[in-house]
Image: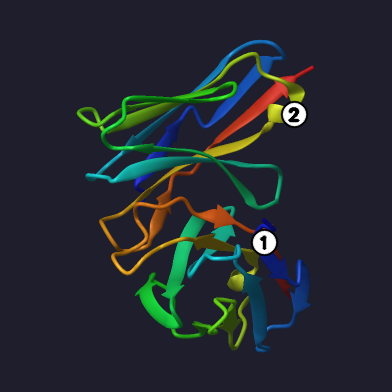
């Protein structure tokens, strides 16, 4: 079963625009992590937001977390062609299992 | 610090053969997890090792096994390969801890692309 489910599954925007991706999860979490994956490569860790945090920033990335709605969003501002990738949210299924459960991801295409 | 490294990067094997993949975690990280990524199933957890002990296991058959060495390096082995084992195998390392890993970021390697023919 998936812990995180991303929406939309695919997103196509022009360079300079903002991109927003949403993630919903099923169970209580300690934290939620966002990853980027360029085609067929490894996952790059973007940001971790803890359950007691509501918003976190890292460069052009802004992540929000709403534990009451069991949802998170990733905003990429002023997108660049290099942001073209798949983005995944992931959370641990339950404390101490060490098992990160991923959603199916959002494929983002940024057109130059 | 050097990142997570995985070898080999690409591998082609024949059905019935076995394969061993290697992962070197970030220096100081004691937890190593393995994931399988396929287009159909997405990213799925295989197992996690901490201090040479398998601490958690996903829902994969016994053909999938792993181990961790005293220097935290880890290997995973797949025996009697099937066509469906073709996938990107990703290793991730984390600081982890005796209390578990779920408070920590996991950092991934570039993966090993396994093709079974």
**In front of the other: A72 or B14:** A72
Q: Residue A69: percent from the left, percent from the top?
A: 23, 28
Residue name at image x 36 percent, y 75 percent = B55
Q: Quadrant of residue A38?
A: top right
**In front of the other: A3 or B115:** A3
Whether residue B70 is situated above or below residue B112 in the rendered picture: below
Query: Image check: A75 left or right of A99?
Result: right
Q: Residue B18: percent from the left, percent from the top?
A: 65, 87
**How packed is label 2: few (under 14 Cα within 10 Å), some, or many (20 or more)?**
few
Spatial distance from mark 2 to mark 1, Cα to Cα? 20 Å
Secondary element at tag 2: helix
Q: Residue B76: percent from the left, percent from the top?
A: 57, 79
Mark 2, residue position: A82
Can residue B41 be seen in this snapshot? Answer: no
Whether residue A51 is situated above or below residue A63 in the rendered picture: below
The reply to whether discs 2 and 1 touch (Cβ–Cβ < 8 Å) is no
Q: Quadrant of the N terminus of chain A?
A: bottom left
Q: Which mark is residue B68?
A: none
Mark 1, residue position: B111
Residue name at image x 59 percent, y 21 percent = A60
Q: Quadrant of the C terminus of chain A?
A: top right
Residue name at image x 63 percent, y 72 percent = B23
Residue name at image x 49 percent, y 54 percent = B106
Q: Residue A62: percent from the left, percent from the top?
A: 48, 22
How has the structure been colored for display? rainbow
Chain name for mark 2: A
Secondary element at tag 1: loop
């Amino acid at each position: 079963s998936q812990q995180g489910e991303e929406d939309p599954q695919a997103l196509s925007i022009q360079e300079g625009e903002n991109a927003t991706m949403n993630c919903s999860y099923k169970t209580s979490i300690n934290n939620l992590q966002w990853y980027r994956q360029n085609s067929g490569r490894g996952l790059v860790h973007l940001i971790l937001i803890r359950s007691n945090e509501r918003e976190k920033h890292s460069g052009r990335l802004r992540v929000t977390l709403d534990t009451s709605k069991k949802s998170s969003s990733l905003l990429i501002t002023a997108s660049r062609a290099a942001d073209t990738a798949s983005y995944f949210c992931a959370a641990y299924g339950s404390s101490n299992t060490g098992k990160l459960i991923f959603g199916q991801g959002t494929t983002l295409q940024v057109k130059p | 610090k050097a990142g997570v490294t995985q070898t080999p990067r690409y591998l082609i094997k024949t059905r019935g053969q076995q394969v061993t993949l290697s992962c070197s975690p970030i220096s100081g990280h004691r937890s190593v997890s393995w994931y399988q990524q396929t287009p159909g199933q997405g990213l799925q957890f295989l197992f996690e090792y901490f201090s040479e002990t398998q601490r958690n296991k996903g829902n994969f058959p016994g053909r999938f096994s792993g181990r961790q060495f005293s220097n935290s390096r880890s290997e995973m082995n797949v025996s009697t390969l099937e066509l469906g084992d073709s996938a990107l195998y990703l290793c991730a390392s984390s600081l982890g801890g005796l209390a578990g890993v779920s408070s920590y970021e996991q950092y991934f390697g570039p993966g090993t692309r396994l093709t079974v023919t």
